[in-house]
Amino acid sequence: PEPIYRARRQFMQQSLALGTAAVAVGGVATATAKPSFVADADVSSPSWLSQKLAEASADTATLDDKLTPYEHVTSYNNFYEFGYNKDDPAKHSDTLKPHPWNVEIAGEAEKTGSFNLEDILSKVELQERVYRLRCVEAWSMVIPWIGFELGSLLKQFNPTSRANYVAFTTLEDALQMPAQGNAFSTIDWPYVEGLTMAEAMHPLTLLAVGLYGKALPNQNGAPLRLVVPWKYGFKSIKSIVKIEFTQKQPPTSWNILAPNEYGFYANVNPEVDHPRWSQATERRLPSGLFSPNIIDTQMFNGYDEVASLYKNVDLRKNF
Ligand code: MTE
């Protein structure tokens, strides 16, 4: 139950604050070697992945926001490959087969090719990271992800000096993602996204393979998705099959669809409204009619450490 995990987490944070004294307390060291939030839910994953997830190091940062309960994180989703309603992905994503899974690394790098997820994960350390996720639709959640820094993966391929951007592509397969076959779909599949090289290498940028201590459920982008906590949620592309180093800024799905509404940068910014609604506040889930739970939106979603990436960028023009 969540209160128990919260209490355990608080204990760990206090122990860490005690520094060397805590090291002497048996159990603390082992406690930090496991994710602090584990859902009761049963998400099937191959044994090599379950083991890897169990070894993830716990997040030791102190984020005061209350976690969004697991059932909300996994039932209120945007994953248009399975439909446009928030409950469609949870209802209809059983058709997605996340294992085995290959990721193609392409473009401006010395090393490229197709790599299976198990190999990719064998070369990285998994960590738990509790991040805010702010959707451009003005709702938000707080999610304990399990993943690894995207930069730690990208470095392994020795990107060349021409690698200015990183482009990402979601699986395209209408058998596994039925709404891709919908003739009325407005998105030109596959879903694509991109980051500048500096954004991709930033230590906050994560490739997630799990949440709440378990493998990613299909509706959250199994088996591998991007998480960029200072950007609107649509940048956090799900079920990635290709990562390409590019010289030019790559096309991105929402920008193709409505360039005046969704920019390439998509940094969370309470001062730049969406043309059709304000971005000054957000609905923190869970929220209801009688407890809407509206809070102020923070610049860069509260991740001020990324501000230096945009020193010379006009954030009104480059929204
Ligand atoms: N990735 C793909 N492939 N398809 C999508 O429709 N939706 C995006 C993003 N990644 C989307 C996607 C949007 S709009 C948001 S807000 C987040 O995923 C939602 O992530 P969540 O469902 O895990 O909360």
Image (cartoon, helix red, strand yellow):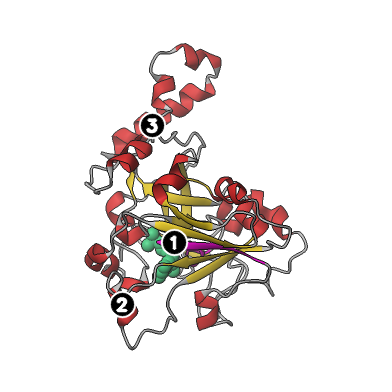
The residue at 51%/37% (across/down) is: 62
- Left or right for 76, reference 305: left
Q: Secondary structure at mark 3?
A: loop
Which stretch appears magenta? 232-246
Image quarter in which the N terminus is found: top left
Residue identifier under label 3: 34
Query: Of the residues tagged 1 and 2, which is closer to the observer?
Result: 1
The residue at 57%/45% (across/down) is: 152
- Are the two marked residues, 1 and 2, in contact with CB atoms closer than 8 angstroms? no
> Seen from this angle, which residue lies furthest top?
24
- Are the two marked residues, 2 and 3, in contact with CB atoms closer than 8 angstroms? no
| Mark 2 closeness class: few <14, some 14–19, many ≥20 residues within 10 Å | many
Residue identifier under label 1: 240
Residue identifier under label 2: 179
- Left or right for 129, reference 275: left
Q: Position of residue 291 (x, y in %)?
A: 33, 59
User: Gap in Å between the C-alphas at discs 2 and 3?
Assistant: 37 Å
